[in-house]
């Protein structure tokens, strides 16, 4: 009997994922019936995006796991009808994309590339940046993405401090945790990178109080989640030059409305949620592996802790 896998995401995602998923299932030697319209009582697994029309999981009584296509699960984790195991997407392609984006923008700000790229006006601006070893970087969030980005920056010579809610240990990174650890991590952050999940405990982690704890003129890079930042507090900190620049890839409302003050602010760079995208080919292999494990009676990978929200 084939394994029934329901694909529950937007139609454009089905077009993108149908072929890579079928290929990944074949490579994993799985006999799978993959479709967008399977009777709920016959569904074994759900490949899911939180913006799907499927919001009531109650009829899916046979379903062994819901396999999220996205790294973020804040759009589904609190759904009271979801009693099945939920796995988030941890994909090497997603990780490498994030590392490249974060490293690129960290170097952009470290080297002050904008000074020359945006000012081709005949003025000889000979301003030499410090070496990486003299530019402390802090990463808030030491999950898979945070640790990978920290390792990349540490290999370039940056002193990297990482903060997480629970104590972590990552090679090349000074790891801190707790309220006192957060204050210490912020106090040295000439460049701050946000890679925390969005939970009630992390919302507005950057606010008027925490922004004031950072070195004057510090840079903020946010490819994590929009609600990590109190937008009004950040705009005020930019206006007073407490924060020198903010490069933002994620926002509370997406697409970012054309009227939002971030677009016109001279110390803000907006990018359209492109820091890291799930690659269909590699993500499909992650999903196939979890289904293979489920069918073999092995523990699923990347399960979400419902209490923590990620």
Image (cartoon, helix red, strand yellow):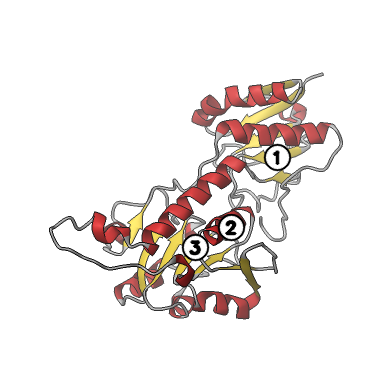
User: Residue 162's quadrant in the figure?
Assistant: bottom right
Residue at 44% across / 45% down in the picture?
274
Which numbered disc flags the more N-terminal residue, 2 or 3?
Answer: 2
Label 3 or label 1, whichever comes before in sequence order: 1
Note whether 67 is above or below 20 in the view shown: below
The quarter of the image holding the N terminus is: top right
Q: Residues within 10 Å of mark 3 (few under 14, many from 20)?
A: many
Mark 2 surroundings: few (<14), some (14-19) or many (≥20) residues within 10 A: some
- Decide which of 9, 149 is in the foreground and name it: 149
For residue 124, side relative to residue 290 (left or right):
left
The residue sitting at 70% across, 44% down in the picture is: 87
Whether residue 303 can be seen here:
yes
Q: Quadrant of the C terminus?
A: bottom right
Please tell me whether mark 1 or mark 2 is closer to you in this view. 2
Toward the viewer: 127 or 247?
127
Labels in figure, total: 3
Describe residue 254's horizontal placement relative to residue 308 as left or right: left
Q: Which x, y percent locates residue 33?
A: 71, 21
Q: Are marks 3 and 1 in contact (CB under 8 Å)?
A: no
Q: Residues within 10 Å of mark 1 (few under 14, many from 20)?
A: many
Q: Report the residue marked by disc 3.
A: 193
Residue nearer the viewer, 126 or 54: 126
Residue pointed to by mark 2: 151
Q: Which mark is residue 66?
A: 1
- Res. 236 image quadrant: bottom left
Where's residue 190, x and y in %?
44, 72
Q: Where residue 263 sits: x, y (%)?
A: 29, 56
Q: Check the image and report above or below for 45 versus 225.
A: above
Q: CA distance from mark 2 to mark 3?
A: 13 Å
């Amino acid at each position: 009997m084939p394994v029934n896998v329901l694909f529950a995401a937007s139609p454009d995602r089905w077009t993108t994922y149908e072929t890579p998923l079928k290929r990944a299932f074949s490579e994993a030697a799985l006999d799978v019936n993959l479709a967008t319209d399977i009777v709920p009582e016959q569904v074994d697994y759900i490949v899911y995006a939180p913006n799907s029309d499927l919001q009531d999981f109650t009829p899916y009584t046979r379903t062994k796991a819901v396999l999220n296509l996205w790294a973020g699960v804040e759009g589904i984790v609190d759904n009271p009808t979801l009693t099945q195991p939920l796995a988030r997407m941890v994909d090497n392609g997603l990780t490498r994309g994030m590392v490249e984006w974060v490293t690129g923008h960290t170097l952009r700000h470290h080297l002050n590339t904008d000074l020359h790229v945006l000012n081709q006006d005949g003025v000889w601006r000979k301003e030499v940046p410090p070496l990486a070893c003299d530019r402390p970087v802090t990463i808030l969030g030491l999950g898979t993405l945070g640790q990978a980005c920290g390792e990349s920056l540490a290999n370039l010579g940056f002193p990297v401090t990482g903060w997480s809610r629970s104590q972590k240990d990552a090679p090349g990174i000074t790891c801190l945790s707790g309220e006192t650890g957060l204050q210490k991590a912020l106090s040295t952050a000439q460049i701050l990178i946000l890679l925390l999940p969005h939970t009630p405990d992390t919302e507005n982690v950057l606010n008027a109080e925490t922004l004031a704890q950072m070195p004057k003129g510090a840079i903020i890079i946010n490819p994590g989640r929009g609600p990590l930042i109190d937008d009004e507090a950040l705009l005020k900190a930019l206006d007073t030059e407490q924060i020198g620049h903010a490069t933002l890839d994620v926002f509370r409302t997406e697409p970012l409305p054309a009227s939002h003050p971030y677009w016109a602010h001279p110390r803000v760079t907006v990018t359209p949620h492109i820091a890291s995208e799930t690659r269909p080919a590699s993500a499909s292999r992650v999903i196939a592996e979890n289904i293979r494990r489920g069918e073999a009676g092995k523990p699923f990978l990347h399960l979400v802790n419902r209490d923590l929200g990620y």
